[in-house]
Image (cartoon, helix red, strand yellow):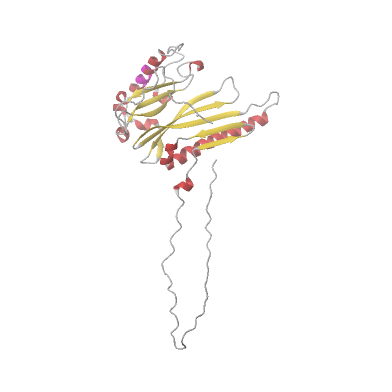
Amino acid sequence: MPSTKARPVAVLGLLAALGACEGKPDAPPPAPAAVSTTAPAPAAPATSAAMARPLTFDQSDEAAKVALRLPAEIASHPALHALLYDRETADLKTFAAKAQADRKASDGKFPWRPYTRQGQWFLAADAAPLVALRALWFEDTGGAHPNHGAASLIWDSAAKRDIQPSALFRPDADMSVLDKAICDAVAQAKTHREGATPLNAMFSCPKWNQTVLVPTPSTSPGKIGGLAVLIDPYVVGPYAEGDYEIVVPVSAFQALLAPAYASAFGGAPRSPGNPDGTLSVRMDLK
């Protein structure tokens, strides 16, 4: 799934006015102007607006085209915005540099087809102290077919840092409970998808930490109602079968949650997803 910062320059001008006045010979001289002994105020720090990252990034040349789209809501979390923008654009620039190197190394027997990588992020849930984002990415490097997949980021707004999905659960939690809930949901979704390959030795149920977990909105305002489980192609079926998104309600894993984040969960998933497990969001890059 570049920014140019303008730095304001302050220009100060100092004017001295000299004048002469006539008065009586015995008039006392004018009192000297008061001199302030107060130390000058320190320069104001750069505003968050001046440091804010954009919501979009585009770079295109003869070797590659890369693009990034971030949700407008991320501007309410400047530290998260900066982290995600900087990380994603760095990855895109690395991808573009690799494309340039591959282009130069090509034998020239075939016309060069520029590589493409695009990523679009969406706000998934906002339930203090957690903010969850999800992404879809698309990549084409000239192979038999393009590739695509999902990504997520979970942000602790109190600690101002991203956390791994494992942090949502108690260290001693029996995660086989979540594994079974995911497996049951995938098996059910396959019954609604025409031509789906049954789960077998080749395409077996993934463990929870082999998927992309995304907290989802709840029917209870300000809460997380469950976890969307995003499963890329090839994991539970052949590429032609596509990817899966299934939703596990919080009631299935409430007892596994870490005390630090348990209060952010409650209710039920607001959007249960599509019966056949297809992804409910699509990229819309211009």
Task: Work out which quarter of the rendered image holds the C terminus and state it.
Answer: top right
Query: For the stretch drawn in magenta, what is the main secondary structure?
Result: helix
Q: Residue 97 vs residue 262: left or right?
A: right
Residue 117 to residue 12: above or below:
above
Residue 161 placed where, x, y %? 40, 39
As for residue 183 lying within the magenta part, the answer is yes
Instruction: Give percent across and percent down for residue 121.
Output: 46, 32
**Measured from the top left, where is residue 210 in percent x and y?**
43, 24
Q: Residue furthest bottom?
A: 26
For the magenta stretch, what is the residue range? 179-184
Residue 275 in picture, x, y percent from top left = 39, 17
Q: How many marks?
A: 0
**Is 282 contained in the magenta span?**
no
**Nearer to the camera, 12 or 202:** 12
Q: Quadrant of residue 277?
A: top left
Name the residue: 53% across, 37% down.
Answer: 57
119 in relation to 2, above or below: above
Q: Name the residue at 58% across, 29% down.
A: 116
Question: Relative to residue 11, is residue 196 drawn left or right?
Answer: left
Residue drawn at the location 48% of the way across and 46% of the way down = 51
Instruction: Name the residue rendered at 35%, 31% in the picture.
Output: 168
**258 sits to left or right of 146:** left
Residue in front for this viewpoint, 232 or 15: 15
Q: Nearer the viewer, residue 62 or 141?
A: 62
